[in-house]
Amino acid sequence: MTASGQASPEPVRFTVLGPVRAWRGETELDAGPPQQRAMLALLLVHAGRPVTLGEVVDVLWGEDPPASAVNVVHRYVGMLRRLLEPGLAVREEGRWLIRGAGGWRLEAGPDQVDLLRFRRMTEDARREGSLDLLTDALALWRGPAAAGIPAEVRAHPVFTALDRELLESVKESADLALRKGAAERVLTALREAATRHPLDEPLQARLVLALAAAGRQAEALDAWQSVRTRLADELGIDPGPELRAAQEQVLRGQAVHTAGPAGRTTREAHQPAARPTQLPPDLAAFAGRRADLAKVLTLLPDDGRTPETVVISAIGGMGGIGKSTLAVHWAHQVARHFPDGQLYVNLRGFDPTGSVLDTGEALRGFVEALGVPPHRIPAGLEAQSALYRSLLADRRVLVVLDNARDAEHVRPLLPGSPGCLVVITSRDRMSGLVTTEGAHPLVLDPLSPEEAREALVRRLGEDRVASAPQAVDEIIARCAGLPLALAVVAARAATHPGFPLAAIAEELADTDGSLDAFADPDPASDVRTVFSWSYRALSADAARLFRLLALHPGPDIGAPAAAGVVGLPVRRTRLLLAELTAARLLTEHAPGRYTCHDLLRAYAGELALAHDSEAERHAASQRVLDHYLRTAHAAGQLFSPYWSVTTLPPAPAGVVAEDFDDDRQALAWFNREHSVLLAVVDQAVRGGSDTYAWQLAWTLERFFDRQGHWHDFLAMQRAGLAAAVRAGERTAQAHIRRGLARASARLGRYDDANVHVRQALDLFTELGDRSGLAHAHRSHGWILDRQGRHAEALDAAGKALELYRATGNRPAEGSALHALGWTHALLGEHEQAAAYFEEALAATDRGNRYGVGGALDSLGYALHHLGDHRRAVASYDDALRLYREVGDRYQEAGTLGRLGDTYVAIGDQPMATTVWRQALAILDGVDPPAADEVRDKLRDLEQAG
């Protein structure tokens, strides 16, 4: 049964090897209009893996999606969910179409999807050498992949790659049939494939050999003559070595039991017309990247054997990160495994002049390097690519495609036969190659401090680096792990051997916030210029977002906050963030969270000063503050519904605030934005935005208090109080002094806490603010309890309860009852405590999971001390369930600790050990002193046992 009570979903099955079709049980489903069917096809191609929103938009609409694209995709998702599981509730997670990882995943396997079944069968066939399995796998195809979707979508590489997959399997089946003397069994598949791919020489050669092996020599020679004529007419070339070798075997009447066209014996079939050696020199000062090198080296067989497929490695990363350097270094290390030569081209995908090298020009250069005279090179990109692949067939060549613009820039340059290694570098993510050609992505990160030091040693020598360790540390920090920046600084030091490294480090410090220290006369070595190559390729809106992101103070940012920065809708901003990520100007380090390299941030800041007016920069900064203030305000009302928060005016134009369904989402947002919120408050203070500073400090109080971030809590309340004093906001001063009292008490600074809470009480009394006064009494009672002054604490909590009732604050009334109960518990009066906790539960709304959880936890404590351990365990379990629903790990750990005490009391040591270990796993990362207390309990328990 599902959560909504529906019966388990009926089995479904799909086909994409031919028309896109779906069945639920024995009933075929209407997969919808062609574009919705195309989305289903995309999910089927990636079955079992997530497909992001950006990928869906790219496949369905290409480079010009409509403004409604995101809405349309979400509509298709909803329709497909209802199609597959008609009884599924709106927000219920289904069995087949699952949301996650920034997109959607079709949770299906080989039993449901013919493509996955085809792949499993072909893998089994390879492992077992079974022609039966391979032909059965080919029989799953019912025409071109994803038939029935729009033609322009069908032309996307994600679908055309399936046709290439079929083609390779047909070739493989032909080779196996020829070895087994069963060529007749594959003739139908070979003929169909040869008709669809008339210029594929390796395929046509296999057809010729299979026809001859089946006793059809005349038909084989007719096939050879037909492809020879077509090559001459359409490409202006003669048959290549494979086709010539196949013809020779037929003419000699040889029995064909070879491994296919690779079994040809003529010297010409094995020897290239020329052996190119085009690799640039390796960098003598290459340093670091050992882990990255280890990853790419695993792509090739250890024993030097020929790879069974074309191996493609796509090395990505931001400008200046060292992609080309690593690619060339790796190429030199493995060049000996490719005896037929090395091809290299700089495609200038991000050239400073904008003169990107045309793919056709690169192809012609490669074909000439392989020995074809210029006048024999055919016209047209497709013909040139076909010739290039023919020349590389059955050769072992290393191909380095440096600085590519995108996947389409390099696709015609990819070999078509096994044995070659292709190394691609690009600032583009090359997701299309990863998806359709099986490229192995490697994204380079900045160098670690140790690798950066090694790079400086390689360029400047061990003695010079060792002589100034502090200056070297400063240089490494300022270069932020960017190899290009390190190279520029090292070059300056190397050309001025008399300059102390301390002086160079001081130059870097003096230019903090700009890239002046990394300037170089050579554009290829100038950090600012290298970054500009990516920036100039951006759309206008993406460029503006990149510039204004420099004004965001936090270490990372989500799409809603970025929308606030730029003043655009969130959906539009997500597309811009994807564009910036694709350009390697941002990194999506976690789903939906984006960060920027320090030097790129400095570059963005320079651009903002140059291109955006002071008024626009100020407006963007204000939108940032408004976004976080208003989102925190919305989250706080769910996180602590009875607590007083400041009233906000209507949101200014362009401000995007997030909203939440419940307290769990609110707490998740607080935890996600913790470090960002600290930076935002600091920016408000430094920028003189006192109103934002005190409003944020007041609004964020309960989050920092409850989650154990007490040092941050104290610092934020101090900053907020100073801002409120400067602004003359007495009500804010009163609330923040109360918060400051709690923060001080959390850290054991009771003298400060007593002063602040007394000032808060006095201010609320002067202001006639009875609601605020009630909260102050509530906090005062809590502070007194912590000092062991329980009689005074009862008085303070009683005053709070009286004021809450007088002002009709029912949720807060439950909190005051809870406080009274806790003080009685501390006095050892557990029967009275339990009564108050029961009363608090009755007064607390069930939707306030935090309030209910706290009362249940305290009730468990009282019941434990009353000896009612069974009910105590039940109460603790109920509290744990609520804390886990909310996602409040800190409160969960506290309850687990107390639950362990109860298990010890009833003699269940294994359960006590289990729950204490769970508490320890949480507390080790957030509250080391509390973790040590739990660790001591575990040690005592172990010794007692």
Image (spheres, rainbow, N blue to C red):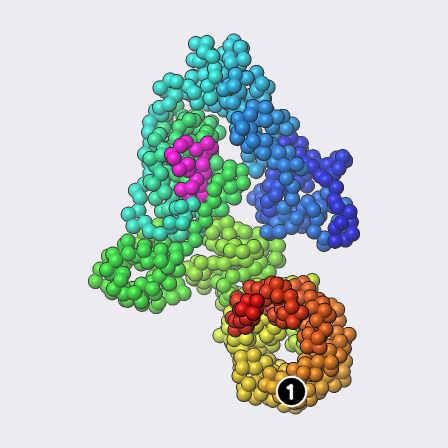
Quadrant (top left, top right, bottom left, bottom right) of the C terminus: bottom right
Is 710 positioned to the left or the right of 108 in the image? left
Residue at the far left: name it.
498
Q: Position of residue 669 (x, y in %)?
A: 61, 64
Which residue is painted at 68% across and 74% down in the image? 864
Q: Looking at the image, can residue 425 be seen?
A: no
**Front in this rendered view, residue 530 or 227:** 227
Residue located beneath label 1 in the image: 790
Identify the secondary structure beneath mark 1.
helix
Q: Position of residue 290 (x, y in %)?
A: 37, 49
**Front in this rendered view, residue 395 or 281:** 395
The question of residue 663 being in magenta is answered with no
Residue at the far front: name it.
945
- Count all numbered tags in the image, as a single digit: 1
**Front in this rendered view, residue 726 or 733:** 733
* Residue stretch rendered in magenta on the structure: 296-315
Q: Quadrant of residue 464?
A: bottom left
The amino acid on which the numbered mark 1 sits, given as a three-letter code, is His
Q: Looking at the image, can residue 754 be seen?
A: yes
